[in-house]
Amino acid sequence: MLHRTEWLPALAAFESAARHQNFAHAAEELHLTASAVSHHVRKLEARLGVALFQRHARGVSLTAEGRQLADAAGSAMADMEGVLRGLRTARDERARVRITTLHSLTYAWLLPRLPGFTAANPHILLHVDTEAALTRFDEGGPDVGIRYGQGHWPGVTTHHLMDDAMFPVASPTLAGIGDVHEAADITKLPLIADLARQGWQDWFRAAGVRGARFEERYSFSDTTDAMKAATHDLGAVLAREQIAEPYLSGGRLIRLPGPAMPTRYSYYVVYPAHRRLRPEARTFVDWLLAQAVR
């Protein structure tokens, strides 16, 4: 009888040929020649002492014995493929880091840096969730989060990532932008607000503009939407320093006169206190903290 090392390639060639009812198609699937597939099948037939295929001018067809072996071989191959797929999936899940973060920070700060992380850690897969709702770190949930606040959340370990500041920006083509020479002039522009705890009233006070009267013509729930609205000449917006770079460097927005007001909130890296970080998640956390230092 064939040794196991001979059975496996012969059975693989037979199973593919039986499924396709064609030696050439089996050869293409297995990256062999048609003659190599035929050789494997003939060797199998010789050792078993039965014909597995009927050969005729238009091709081949299975004999009764061939159909019996094809059913068993196909079932065994399917079982093995299922096990192999499960093992690959388990491996991929172990290597996957699930991150919950802010849409605005992802677009402006995280995405430009991710190619560097991937180049240094090609085996780590990332799943990034930017849902606005505060995600719970339940079993099967995210491994790591980036949050904006004062750094006090129950049930999580917290690392300070970076501070932030706010300053006014607008499109260089916004109507009336040429008349803005000092902070007080910004009150004459249409203003865009978001849902941040600190807004225009706080900034004008920090800029020394007393009794400022202004109109918040637009309000957006998402900071990214507020920034993009400013690029469309809808008004001036208070930009956060950590997410303003893509807009300023590309010239879509320009900084207006006035100070950068430190925010009461900062960015923090968080992860569940009750669960030990997997090595892949620890690598990502360490990378995040290093990026903030740079």
Image (cartoon, rainbow, N blue to C red):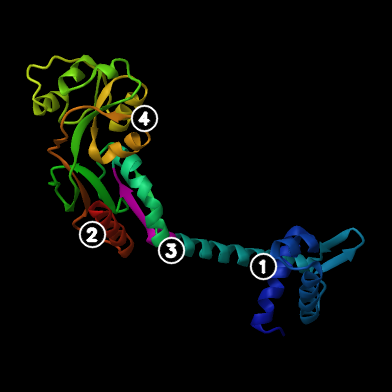
Q: Residue 73 — which label?
A: 1
Q: In the rendered image, which quarter is residue 193 located in?
A: top left
The CA distance from mark 4 to mark 2 is 43 Å
Residue 58: image location, x then y, percent: 90, 58
- Residue type highlighted by circle 1: Ala
Q: In the rendered image, which quarter is residue 255 located in?
A: top left
- Residue type highlighted by circle 4: Arg
Task: Name the front one of labels 4 and 2.
Answer: 4
Task: Looking at the image, tell me whether mark 2 or mark 3 is earlier in sequence order.
Answer: 3
Task: Looking at the image, tell me whether mark 4 or mark 2 is earlier in sequence order.
Answer: 4
Is residue 98 inside the magenta stretch?
yes
Q: Is residue 109 left or right of residue 183?
A: right
Q: Residue 275 — which label?
A: 2
Residue bearing mark 4: 252
Mark 4 falls on what kind of element?
Answer: loop
Cβ atoms under marks 2 and 1 closer than 8 Å: no
Residue 271: image location, x then y, percent: 23, 53
Q: What residue is at 29 percent from the left and 58 percent from the top? A: 287
The CA distance from mark 3 to mark 4 is 43 Å
The magenta-colored residue range is 92-101
> Is residue 138 visible in the rendered structure shown here?
no
Nearest to the observer: residue 44 or residue 147: 147
Nearest to the observer: residue 293 or residue 70: 293
Task: Name the front one of labels 1 and 3.
Answer: 3
